[in-house]
Image (spheres, helix red, strand yellow):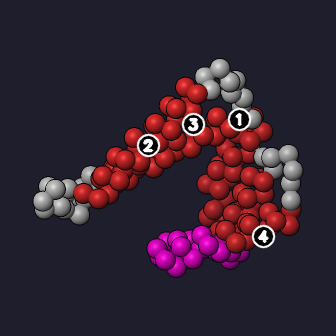
Amino acid sequence: MKTLKDAGGGLLIAAIGLLFLLGAREMPVGSLRNMGPGMVPTALSVVAIFAGLAIAALEALRNAKAAMTLDLRALVCVGGAIALYAVLMESAGLLATTVIAVFLLAAAPQRFRPVETLLVGVGLSVFTWAVFVKGLGMPLSFLPDLSS
């Protein structure tokens, strides 16, 4: 299982690098003598892509004989939490949707800690509200809209 996590982590690093590379493509790169604003993001993105792919490849080669197992319970919980978040966000509000999604995600492993899960859910809700509503000005409601 550690191999799957390490290889997946490498692929995640590469994917994030690719996203940043796509985001920086509109910025002029310039030259080494006269660097543009896109030089550093482009360079770091390329480094992240190659490093992530190298990590994934090395882990896959190192443990090619190890059997990779699929945790169906975790897959269902993660997929369900994403779908639930998309369906409930407008009607239930950010707080309830995030707490419910965190509880569903916490059900993936065998041990379940309800108090810690509730604290993480509320904390994540407040953090998400601060970043997306207050910081970025997105029109998301924190609590459910009971007026309709």
Element at label 4 = helix
Residue type indicated by callout 3? Ala
Residue type indicated by callout 2? Ala
The residue drawn where x is 60% and y is 40% is 6
The residue drawn where x is 14% and y is 55% is 31
- Crowdedness near tag 3: few (<14), some (14–19) or many (≥20) residues, C-alpha within 10 Å: many
Residue type indicated by callout 4? Leu
> Which residue is farthest front?
62
Element at label 1 = loop
Q: Position of residue 107 (x, y in %)?
A: 81, 50
Distance from Cα at disc 3 to Cα at disc 1: 10 Å
Distance from Cα at disc 2 to Cα at disc 4: 35 Å
Residue type indicated by callout 1? Met
Q: Are marks 2 and 1 in contact (CB under 8 Å)?
A: no
Q: Position of residue 43 (x, y in %)?
A: 30, 52
- Crowdedness near tag 2: few (<14), some (14–19) or many (≥20) residues, C-alpha within 10 Å: some
Which quadrant would the N terminus be assigned to in this image? top right
Magenta stretch: includes residue 110:
no
Determine which residue is flagged by label 3. 7
Asked if residue 66 lies left or right of residue 46, the reply is right
Instruction: Name the N-terminal-most of marks 2 and 1.
Output: 1
The residue drawn where x is 52% and y is 41% is 10
Closest to the observer: 110 or 10? 10
- Crowdedness near tag 1: few (<14), some (14–19) or many (≥20) residues, C-alpha within 10 Å: few
Instruction: Report the magenta residues as a range.
Output: 125-148
Element at label 2 = helix
Q: Position of residue 11 (x, y in %)?
A: 51, 40
Determine which residue is flagged by label 4. 119
Q: Which mark is residue 1?
A: 1
Determine which residue is flagged by label 2. 51
